Image (spheres, rainbow, N blue to C red):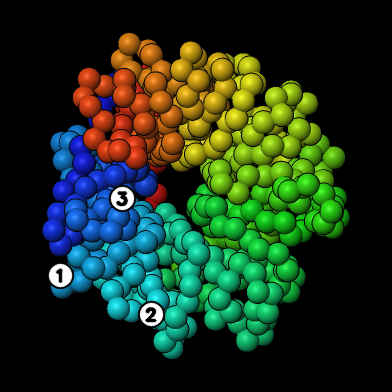
Amino acid sequence: MSITLIANPDVAALAISGATVQLLEAVSFSDDGSHLVVKATFTEDGGQGQLRYGYFLYDIENEAYALNFNTLLVSDNRLTSSNIEKFSFTGTIDNYSVVAEIEEAGEPAATLTHLVNGVVQSADVLTDALGVDYDINVEHFLLAEDARHLAVQTSDASLASDLNPDTNDSSDIYVIDLETNVITRVSEVGGAEVASDTFLQSIAIVDDVVQVGFVTDEAYVSFSKYDQNTTDTSGPIGTRTDAYMWSDGLTTQGALTGKARFTLLSELNNNTASGFVSRDAGIALTGSGQYFSSTSEFIDSNDQNEALDTFVYQNGEVSILNYNDVVLDNTTQLLDSSTNGRYVVLLSLASQVSGTTGSQQLIMIDTQSGEGRVVSQNAAGNAGDNYSIGGVIAPSGVAVAFTSLATNLTNELPNAFGGSLYLRQFDDINSSPEVKFN
């Protein structure tokens, strides 16, 4: 087991007069786990302190940056003035696909650009899908592993069909087929739109089924799993917020079948909605279950800590994640999971993992054995002396990349004021990467 400090990328080419990296974060691993997508937040030297973002592909074995996505996505004359606001990657260094939201200098709105193996396929995905020029405010988006299906969250009405126009003034989720430009609205029930916002959390393809995880105050299921808390408008904040999964199969041609269904993930043992799901923690969709975080005290009878916990939904049953056979005594927030769902990484303030530091640590749980371990610790086994604030896990689970403010994780000095990036690799996890779409 080893831990290394990842060096800052060279962001000088993205600025006019030099730049300083303020924060380094891991976005995702490549499908084969050999590379890491890194986000660098930087400020221009002598500027007004405005934050800008650079995205890079880091070669783990060679400890060097292999690609600068900004230079691939933005023309040379706009490189120092445009910004990549959001970014989603899938694939390997030899066969990858990227969708990025680019805010061009002097342009009224940002655009979604589709890049495949260094070549721009679409300068404006939404305009291509709609067939006309639109300025659409995209709140969030994620690209599926097949590099074909793109989930988009927006409150703009332009993506809705004429048969079911968007009139709810709320955030909705759509899935766009990048090959056919067919747009499918996720946030509707029985062909009718819903009233409340839907917040996109994740997209995955599991056993040839496209799954979209989202959080909402709206009811998407009824009968035995009736979402009763939707009508509780007078309850405390979070009372109505639940985790859902939308799923639709794929045809032999790789398109959606149009036979979508919803699954309520945050349910109680009486099949009603629990509420109190975190909008910040996300949802992980895997082959062995779906993970989400909630402060509800009623999902699992073993939950007595009155804090945010992480749960797994498996075949209609929901249970809390244990750490070495105990329920952690303080906040435990979901970050990410391995492809097969066996390994899950979380942020926790629990005393069982923070030790004498009292700092939030990044932990990993083997959901098959129940074993838990602190990832944000040094070679001597000492937990980080300051907060860890985010991270991702490799598809196989053999490595975790995370951002931390700690100063004692390696012998090297931290290299970013807002948080440095570390890589933890595990010798005792021998799972092979699960790559389906290459």
Question: Most extreme residue toward the top, as rendered?
Answer: 380
Which circle marks residue 363 in the picture?
Answer: none
Q: Which residue is depicted at the point 42% across and 71% down?
A: 178
Q: Amino acid at mark 3?
A: Thr
Which circle marks residue 41 in the picture?
Answer: 3
Question: How much space separates mark 1 and mark 2, taking CA atoms?
Answer: 20 Å
Asked if residue 174 can be seen in this view, the reply is no
Q: Residue 41, image x and y in percent?
A: 31, 50
In the rendered image, which quarter contains the C terminus?
bottom left
Q: Which residue is depicted at the point 16% across and 48% down?
A: 10
Q: Amino acid at mark 2?
A: Pro
| Quadrant housing residue 47 | bottom left
Residue 371 lies, with reference to residue 333, above or below; the image says above
| Quadrant housing residue 61 | top left
Question: How much space separates mark 1 and mark 3, taking CA atoms?
Answer: 20 Å
Q: Which residue is depicted at the point 34% across and 37% down?
A: 419
Q: Upstream in the sequence, badge 2 or badge 3? A: 3
- Mark 1 is surrounded, within 10 Å at the Cα level, by few (under 14), some (14 to 19) or many (20 or more) other residues, namely few
Which circle marks residue 76 in the picture?
Answer: 1
Q: Amino acid at mark 1?
A: Asp
Residue named by callout 2: 108
In the rendered image, which quarter contains the N terminus?
top left
